C-alpha cells in the first residue's frame, strides 16, 4: 500500500475515533436527559445540562480539528479530557465513576485506538519525509 495513502487513512481513523466518542457521549446524554428523565426535570436544569453537554461536544470537535495538525497530541488530550470530566463528576457524586463503566471502558478503548492510529500516521509521515526530504 502506498505510504501516503496509509498515512491519510490512519489519520482519518484517529480523527473519527475522537469525533465518534464526542458524538456518542452527547447523544447518550440527550437521550437520558430528554427521553428518560425529561418529565421529571425542570426546563432550567435540562437547559443547563444541555449546555454542559454541548461544551463537552465542542471540546471533542476541537480535538477532532486539532488532530488534523497534531494527531497524537489531540488523541491524548481527548482521552485526558474524557477522564478528567468523569473524575470531576465522581468528586461531585461518588457513584458516577462506576455508573456506565462499560461505556467508559469502551470509550477509553476507542480513544486508545485513535492514539495508535495517530502514532502510525506520525510514523508514516516521518518515513515519507526521509524518502522525499
Image (tube, rainbow, N blue to C red):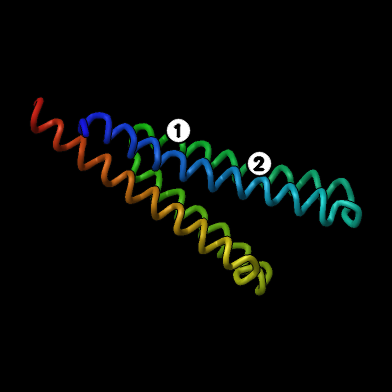
Quadrant including the N terminus: top left
In this orientation, which residue lies closer to the viewer: 93 or 7?
7
Crowd around label 2: few <14 · some 14–19 · many ≥20 (10 Å): some
Q: How many numbered marks does the figure carry? A: 2
Residue 63 location, x and y as percent?
46, 40
The reply to whether discs 2 and 1 touch (Cβ–Cβ < 8 Å) is no
Q: Is residue 29 left or right of residue 70?
A: right
Residue pictured at 46% horizontal, 49% vertical: 78
Q: Is residue 54 left or right of residue 70?
A: right
Which residue position holds label 2?
Answer: 54
Mark 2 and mark 1: Cα distance apart in space: 16 Å
Residue 83 location, x and y as percent?
51, 60
> Outermost residue toward the bottom?
94
Residue pictured at 56% horizontal, 65% vertical: 87
Q: Which mark is residue 65?
A: 1
Q: Would you place residue 104 above or below residue 52 in this image?
A: below
Q: Which mark is residue 19?
A: none
Quadrant including the C terminus: top left
Residue 60 location, x and y as percent?
52, 42
Label 2: element kind? helix
Residue pictured at 33% horizontal, 39% vertical: 10
Crowd around label 1: few <14 · some 14–19 · many ≥20 (10 Å): some
> Outermost residue toward the front?
1
Disc with the residue nearer the chain's start (2 vs 1): 2
In this orientation, which residue lies closer to the viewer: 26 or 58?
26
Label 1: element kind? helix
Residue 32 location, x and y as percent?
76, 54
Residue pictured at 34% horizontal, 32% vertical: 69
Amino acid at each position: 500500500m502506498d505510504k501516503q495513502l496509509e498515512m491519510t487513512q490512519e489519520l482519518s481513523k484517529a480523527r473519527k475515533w475522537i469525533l465518534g466518542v464526542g458524538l456518542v457521549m452527547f447523544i447518550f446524554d440527550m437521550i437520558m436527559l430528554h427521553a428518560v428523565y425529561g418529565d421529571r426535570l425542570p426546563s432550567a436544569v435540562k437547559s443547563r445540562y444541555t449546555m454542559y453537554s454541548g461544551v463537552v461536544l465542542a471540546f471533542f470537535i476541537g480535538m477532532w480539528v486539532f488532530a488534523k495538525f497534531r494527531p497524537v497530541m489531540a488523541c491524548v488530550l481527548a482521552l485526558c479530557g474524557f477522564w478528567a470530566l468523569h473524575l470531576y463528576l465522581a468528586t461531585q457524586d461518588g457513584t458516577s465513576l462506576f455508573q456506565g463503566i462499560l461505556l467508559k471502558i469502551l470509550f477509553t478503548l476507542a480513544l486508545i485506538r485513535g492514539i495508535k492510529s495517530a502514532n502510525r500516521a506520525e510514523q508514516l509521515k516521518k518515513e515519507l519525509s526521509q524518502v522525499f526530504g
